[in-house]
Image (cartoon, grey):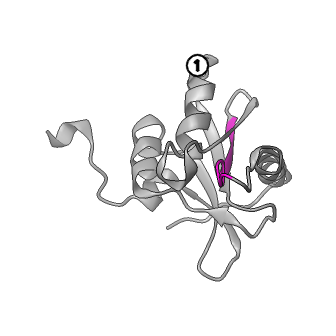
Amino acid sequence: MKYYTISEEDRELIRRGIETIRMCYDPVRKHHQVGAALRCKSGNIYTGVNCSGIHGACAEYIVMGAAVTAGEKEFDTIVAVRETAPNSLYAPCGNCRQMLFEYCPDIKVILNDAQGNIVKVTAADLLPFAWTAVDE
């Protein structure tokens, strides 16, 4: 697995994810526990939150949908944040990994590794042996 350098743009993306979850988290209903930020190759950044607690639509799906709806077609980097600190980055769930792989296998994903370090890898690296349409 190749690791990519965390840039200042990446740190800004993390900050945007943290801002989003701080703004949207609902501690009473426990809604919107994960925020995501997506930087497109155009340079535009989109943000979103998960819906319906932890079993609804993931933040990565929401933010990807917002970007696609806005006309974006090329994606650079995505990050999901659970809490309001940079060491609370989420790795995408299996369903999100498959979605990211299908839309853009070369998208970079920022997450915490097992030791809590911030790392950046491709979606393809997060989903070895991914299903593809040619598998049918």
Front residue of this view, candidates 119 and 14: 14
Q: Mark 1 highlights which residue?
A: 69
Q: Which quadrant is home to the C terminus?
A: top left
Q: Secondary structure at mark 1?
A: helix
Front residue of this view, candidates 71 and 28: 28
The span shown in magenta is: 29-39
Query: How many callouts does the rendering have?
Result: 1
Q: Is residue 37 magenta?
A: yes
Front residue of this view, candidates 117 and 57: 57
Image coordinates for residue 95, horizontal then vertical, percent: 40, 50
Tell me which residue sits at (70%, 75%) in the image. Answer: 117
Tell me which residue sits at (73%, 50%) in the image. Answer: 26
Q: Is residue 63 left or right of residue 97?
A: right
Q: Is residue 29 left or right of residue 106?
A: right
Tell me which residue sits at (78%, 53%) in the image. Answer: 14
Hey, which quadrant is residue 70 in on the image?
top right
Q: Neighbour class for label 1 at 10 Å: few (<14), some, many (≥20)?
A: few
Q: Is residue 122 left or right of residue 30?
A: left
